[in-house]
Amino acid sequence: YSLAGFSGLGGRLLLGALADRLGAKLVLVGGLFVQAMSIAIYLAVGQLGEFYALSVVFGLAYGGVMPLYAVLVREYFGARIMGTVFGAVSAFASLGMALGPLAGGWVFDTFSAYRWLYVGSFAIGMAAVAVAFSFPSAKRPPQPSLDLGRAQAAPRRRTALREHRTHRLRAAFAAAEGAARGAGAQRHGEGGA
């Protein structure tokens, strides 16, 4: 289990970088699928070296999908309620992790083998893939342009726009001031007559 945990550290970085490039949903679906397949392959593992190799693959996928849940929560629910939604997601994950050993013990005590434990875990893993796959695609923000010509022209446009607004405000104030002076002159003319 320690080897899977250590490889999960690398999985967080690897799958996080892939999610930045490909999108969190696609990488989550792929990571969950690799987890489910790794659990199924445990049934065929017979050598210690195979077990360790499979633990590395499982750990990369398991550790890698964990941070993606936070990304998906923000994409689908927004930052305003992210804490509440992510808390609920974490609570359900913790519930599953708490009940998993109890269910595994019951399966082993009932069938005197681990085979059905792996089969059940594989089925739950594939159900997680189906649920993640059913998420609607989130709209990704447009990537910033590397067009340096536009990038250099943008500050000039902002400056020109600012100057135009300033000129319009000055003209409006001048007109208001002129109107006020005219009104004041009329009052003085009326009062003196």
Image (cartoon, rainbow, N blue to C red):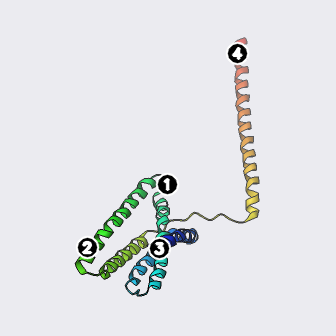
User: Pointer 1 and pointer 3: residues touching (CB < 8 Å)?
Assistant: no
Between discs 1 and 3, the one toward the N terminus: 3
Select label 1 or label 4 by which is in front. 1
Marks 2 and 1, how far apart in space? 40 Å
User: Pointer 2 and pointer 1: residues touching (CB < 8 Å)?
Assistant: no
> Of the residues shown, which amino acid type is indicated by label 4?
Glu
Say which residue label 1 marks: 79
Residue 34, quarter of the rendered image: bottom left
Say which residue label 4 marks: 190
Between discs 2 and 3, the one toward the N terminus: 3
> Label 4 crowding class (10 Å Cα cut-off): few <14, some 14-19, many 20+?
few
Left/right placement of residue 184 relative to residue 137 reads: right
> Label 3 crowding class (10 Å Cα cut-off): few <14, some 14-19, many 20+?
many
User: Pointer 4 and pointer 2: residues touching (CB < 8 Å)?
Assistant: no
> Of the residues shown, which amino acid type is indicated by label 2?
Trp
Between discs 3 and 4, the one toward the N terminus: 3
Marks 3 and 4, how far apart in space? 93 Å
Instruction: Give residue 106's mark.
Output: 2
Helix, strand or loop under label 2: helix
Residue 182, position as x, y percentages in the image: 73, 25
